[in-house]
Image (tube, grey):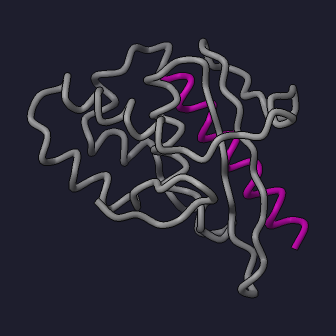
Amino acid sequence: MTGRQHGFAMLPTIDEIVSNFELLDEWEERYRYIIELGRLMEPLPKDAYNDVNKVQGCASQVWLQTGLDSTNGEPLLHLRGDSDAHIVRGLVALLISLYSGKTPSEALSTDALALFKELGLSEHLTPQRSNGVRSMVERIRRDAQMALAAS
């Protein structure tokens, strides 16, 4: 399994995650895979666990840190995150693979909820978790909007 480099961790690309997901027939295997994705994430620095990065509207504790990387000209989103719940940490990893490395305008036109539906995650997440995912997506979109406004 290959992936692109995000700091220390090797998260697979979103396309790799989708194809790996399709290979797993049982939902229990898919849940384990999501949890494994959470373990591959680049760790958040201690000072990132703060109120600014905390995502409101999640039942579990979730932190998302959004940065911009302009080393290759156009600014690209660089996301890092964490959660105190294994499955939620995996969902954070999924969103990071989807959004990290995109320009702010690409991020705004990316439909994470459609991906979750395509993967069948929507019907297997509790309403509370689905609301948490929506809160994370709204937060990423807001950060992308602010980055766009600042450029």
Whether residue 108 is visible here, answered yes or no, is no
Relative to 56, say whether 138 is above or below: below
Locate residue 34 relative to residue 76 in the image: left or right.
left
Q: Residue at x 47, y 36 (%)?
A: 39
What residue span does the magenta drawing correspond to? 130-151
What x and y, as percent, mark residue 8? 59, 55
Q: Nearer the viewer, residue 66 or 116?
A: 66
Pick out the residue farthest to the front. Answer: 8
**Dominant SS in magenta:** helix
Pick out the residue farthest to the right. Answer: 150
Relative to 25, say whether 140 is above or below: below
Pick out the residue farthest to the left. Answer: 25
Q: Nearer the viewer, residue 25 or 127?
A: 25
Q: Nearer the viewer, residue 60 or 112?
A: 60
Question: The C terminus appears in which quarter of the rendering?
Answer: bottom right
* Residue 115 colored in magenta in the image: no
Relative to 151, say whether 1 is above or below: above
Q: Nearer the viewer, residue 2 or 131?
A: 2
What x and y, as percent, mark residue 31? 29, 27
Question: The N terminus appears in which quarter of the rendering?
Answer: bottom left
Task: Count numbered badges in the picture.
Answer: 0
Q: Residue at x 60, y 15 (%)?
A: 60
Residue 144 position by quadrant: bottom right
